[in-house]
Image (tube, helix red, strand yellow):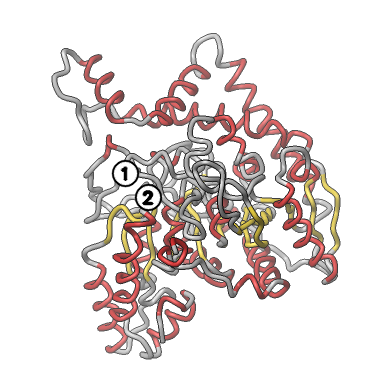
Amino acid sequence: MDPCSLTAVQIARAVKARELTAVAVWEAFEARIRRFNPTLNAFLHVNPQAAAEAAAIDARVAAGEDPGPLAGVPVAVKDNIVTCGMPTTCASRILEGWVSPYDATVVKNLRAAGAVIAGKTNLDEFAMGGSNENSAFGPVRNPWDPRAVPGGSSGGSAAAVAARLVPLALGSDTGGSVRQPASFCHLHGLKPTYGRVSRHGLVAFASSLDQIGPLTRTADDAALLHGVLAGHDPHDATSLRPDQLPSPPAPDGPLRVGVVREFLAEGLDPGVREVVEAALAKWKAAGATLVDVSLPSAGFGIAIYYLLATSEASSNLSRYDGVRYAFRAADARNLEDLYSRTRGQGFGAEVKRRILLGTYALSAGWYDAYYRKAQQVRTLIRREVAAAFETCDVLAGPTVPTPPFALGALIDDPLSMYLSDMYAVVANLAGVPALSVPAGFTRAEGMTADGVGAIPTLPVGLQVMARPGHEETLFAFARGQEALAPELGGRVAPDPEEVSR
């Protein structure tokens, strides 16, 4: 039995039944990490205590205890989620080598559920990017084609799961940073309801938008991991109590799928459109009702997102000043020079760009014109999304307007990079849960540096959104998608050495 070919559900069941040991599971995955991470650059740090954690789980099983729902399952953690005993760098020089004195709440939940923490994964610096090329420690490569990006900012987590370096990984999603990599890597990726999963220990980017979510190969694994992560946390002031969450009723009759008109408009790649429309046609043939839905303000989503997110980033990242912890520039002449040198040397170009945009939007004379107006339009988007759910159970459309693009293709074109999240940001602005599920594959030209050569087949994701608290509706949809397209579940990314041949 090869542990790397199993799902998380299967691994936990086998460890509890003593058909596999947690140590054997970890050794199998660690071997793949050592073998393929030099090519993919998915992991920034491998947990040196993972073998000991696995052995402790085996000891509990031998003693007749139940270690929890993730017994012996290796889980990778995005490196903007703090962990004891391992660095948390946010893929930035300004935090290089910094080790947190405490575990994030989600990491505590993983340990309590019997998981083995595999290590910390690469990301766009401070989760700011859509390609995982903004990392201070080098870009991540897509396991389906190493010439392509894996998506961002949770590209390391997505690549690790797609390449079967781990069965499960945590990402964070501020404007699509779990769902876009899920789409690009043929995975399930969830952004939960805002407040459903604790943000305590997640290094803040944009606090009103950030959420932690799972990246997995199957719907059941996504539901399993989300169940471990979700719950009220008194350490997080935005965490929802059980009485604040609805008890979703099961859909009455055929599923009503709202197809968002604006998500199938101009700007959508023809190959992505073909895959998404084919997936929706299967749902219709299976008895679902497709409902035409309009979100008129969705077209302003990117503009609103980049005003609000950068404004919050400007505030949140002001703590990195070289005074209290982490990197401090040398030879500063005075306090102002210390701030300037530390941030100038420690932050990368994209982080600096977003801090400047946010500082400008919050500046005197422009606050009302930009930040306040953006909040007003955000309210319109929330109302339109809520109104759409009066006629349907889920809202559907493509996750990303394009297939995975080549490394370097958009690195000097930030506007085009930002537009990759044009469909994803709506869920963050509205605070609703959204899930990207594998929809199929399309062909993307120009993967070689000169635009000549192979035309690879690359993944496409279908995004579905549900009412706040209705994550189970999304998991039911994902299971339905697996049943309608079983051939997709059997496809796994080739080993990098096979692609290179």
Comparing 235 with 253, the one in front is 253
> Is 339 rendered above or below residue 440?
above
The image quadrant where one finds the N terminus is bottom left
Tag 2: amino acid: Asn
Q: Which residue is drawn at 45% across and 44% down?
A: 237
Residue 210 visible in the displayed image: no
The image quadrant where one finds the C terminus is bottom left
Left or right placement of residue 396 versus residue 437 in this view = right
- Name the spot of residue 401 as percent of width and height, x first: 67, 45
> Is 92 rendered above or below residue 82?
above
Q: Residue at x 31, y 74 (%)?
A: 26
> Is 344 rendered above or below residue 493?
above
Looking at the image, the residue that sits furthest to the top is: 365
- The crowd level at tag 1 (other Cα within 10 Å; few <14, some 14-19, many 20+) is some
Tag 1: amino acid: Phe
Q: Mark 2 points at which residue?
A: 122
